[in-house]
Every structure is written in C-alpha cells, then in structure tokens.
Image: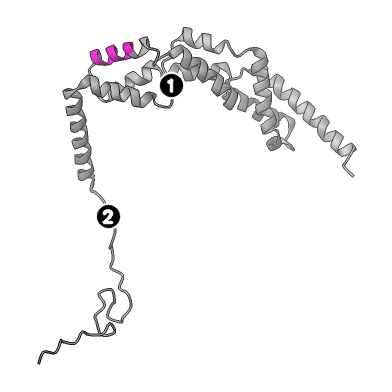
C-alpha cells in the first residue's frame, strides 16, 4: 500500500525499432518521398501557370519590370532575349514594348554594347573567329549593323594569333599522325571555330613545320 508501481527496466522494455530477432527492423520505404504521377505533375504545372497568368493579369507592368530586372542582374542581355522572356510569361505586347523602350532609353538595354563585350570575351576565351561570332550575335537578336561594328575590333592579326593559339594547344594530340591527317584535323577544328580555309591551312602548315623542327632539335640535341 502506498508503493509506487515498479518501472520496467530498459532491458525489458519493448524496442519499437527492434524486429522479432531483436535486431533493428528496416521498414521498407521509410523516409522516401512518394513520386508524383504524371497526372499530378501536369496538374501542378497547370496550377503554377494559372497562378502566373493571374499575377500578370493583375499587374502586368509590375511583373514585366521584375522579369527584366531579374534577367539583367549580373549580366547584360539583348532586347530580343528580354522580349522572349516577357512573351514566355504572356506579358501583353504593348506593356512589353513600352518597358523595353524605357529600359533602352536609360541604358539598361544596349545591344551595341552587348555585342562589343560579347565579341571581345568570346574571341579571347574561346578563340572564335568573326564568322562564328556573327552567328552567335544573330541568334541573340543583335542586328547586322551593330554586329558588324562589334566585329571590327578583331583584325587579321588578331585572328591569326588566336588561330595559332588554338592549334598550339591541340598539337600534342596529333603528333605522330600522318601529316595529312594531322592537317585535316587541325584545319577542321579551326573551321568549327569560324575560321576560313585559307587562314586555317596557312596557320596549320606553319605550326606543323615549326613543331617538326622543334622535335628534330630534341632528337639531335637530347638533354644530358
């Protein structure tokens, strides 16, 4: 009487994590997220699209301005790229045009400056020739006159130097090949970068001839 019921010792308490043999049970599927069905995924996408459409309808200018500012954060973009983003969100054409004009007037959109920076960066980092750069600018919506002006910063000496640098980096992979095979591979690489056949073959032949001389010197005068 008055005694407190004894508490079972931990050794006698049932362990919810233990299986019949005392080991930890492995509940199949525990912690896994259920994969949504295709119908559920489509329903979710439709709901998201509807919510975005309602947002645009309620405040088209505010939504469009946010889209433009977000897209321009950290990098420049062409007017066409930005127009495509607005169209994808179904911003009305008149609202899109007005905002794009406004952003252009204050200098936030500047296709000429974009083209100049793009050409300088891609030529320096990738060794692309004017032909390839012109194609990229066209895809981005830069008009031909602005693209032409930007491409004028690359002269023939710049092209030859860039082409030679590309060939020099690739030279090790073609050493030991038949000269004609090596020439075709190196010239093909330059063609994919936008270089014309005349310049490409001239640079490749020059590089191969110099490389052959260098290898001959190493054979004739091995290091001690």
Residue corresponding to mark 1: 76
Q: Residue furthest left?
A: 1
Give how far across and how far down residue 49 sits, in percent. 21, 32
Magenta region, residue range? 94-102
Residue pictured at 59% horizontal, 23% vertical: 124
Looking at the rendered image, the quarter that the C terminus falls into is: top right
Q: Is residue 95 magenta?
A: yes
> Is residue 189 among what the camera can see?
yes
Secondary structure under badge 2?
Answer: loop
Looking at the rendered image, the quarter that the N terminus falls into is: bottom left
Give how far across and how far down residue 59 sits, in percent. 19, 22
Residue pictured at 74% horizontal, 30% vertical: 179
Q: Which mark is residue 200?
A: none
Q: Residue 92 is drawn in which quadrant?
A: top left
Q: Residue furthest top?
A: 145
Dot 1: within a 10 Å radius of its alpha carbon, few (fewer than 14), some, or many (20 or more) residues? Answer: some
Q: Residue 183 is drawn in which quadrant?
A: top right
Residue pictured at 42% horizontal, 13% vertical: 110
């Amino acid at each position: 009487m008055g005694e407190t019921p004894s508490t079972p010792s931990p050794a006698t308490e049932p362990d919810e994590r233990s299986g019949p043999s005392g080991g930890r049970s492995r509940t199949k599927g525990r912690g896994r997220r259920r994969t949504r069905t295709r119908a559920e995924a489509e329903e979710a996408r439709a709901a998201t699209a509807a919510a975005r459409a309602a947002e645009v309808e309620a405040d088209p200018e505010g939504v469009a301005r946010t889209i433009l500012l977000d897209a321009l954060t950290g990098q420049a973009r062409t007017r066409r790229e930005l127009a495509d983003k607005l169209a994808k969100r179904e911003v009305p054409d008149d609202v899109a045009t007005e905002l794009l004009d406004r952003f252009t007037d204050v200098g936030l959109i500047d296709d000429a400056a974009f083209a100049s920076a793009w050409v300088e960066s891609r030529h320096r980092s990738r060794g692309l020739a004017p032909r390839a750069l012109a194609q990229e600018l066209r895809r981005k919506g830069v008009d031909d006159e602005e693209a032409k002006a930007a491409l004028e910063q690359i002269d023939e000496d710049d092209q030859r130097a860039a082409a030679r640098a590309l060939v020099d980096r690739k030279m090790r992979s073609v050493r030991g090949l038949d000269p004609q095979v090596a020439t075709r591979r190196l010239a093909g690489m330059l063609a994919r970068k936008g270089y014309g056949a005349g310049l490409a073959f001239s640079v490749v032949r020059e590089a191969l001839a110099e490389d052959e001389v260098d290898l001959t010197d190493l054979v004739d005068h091995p290091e001690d």
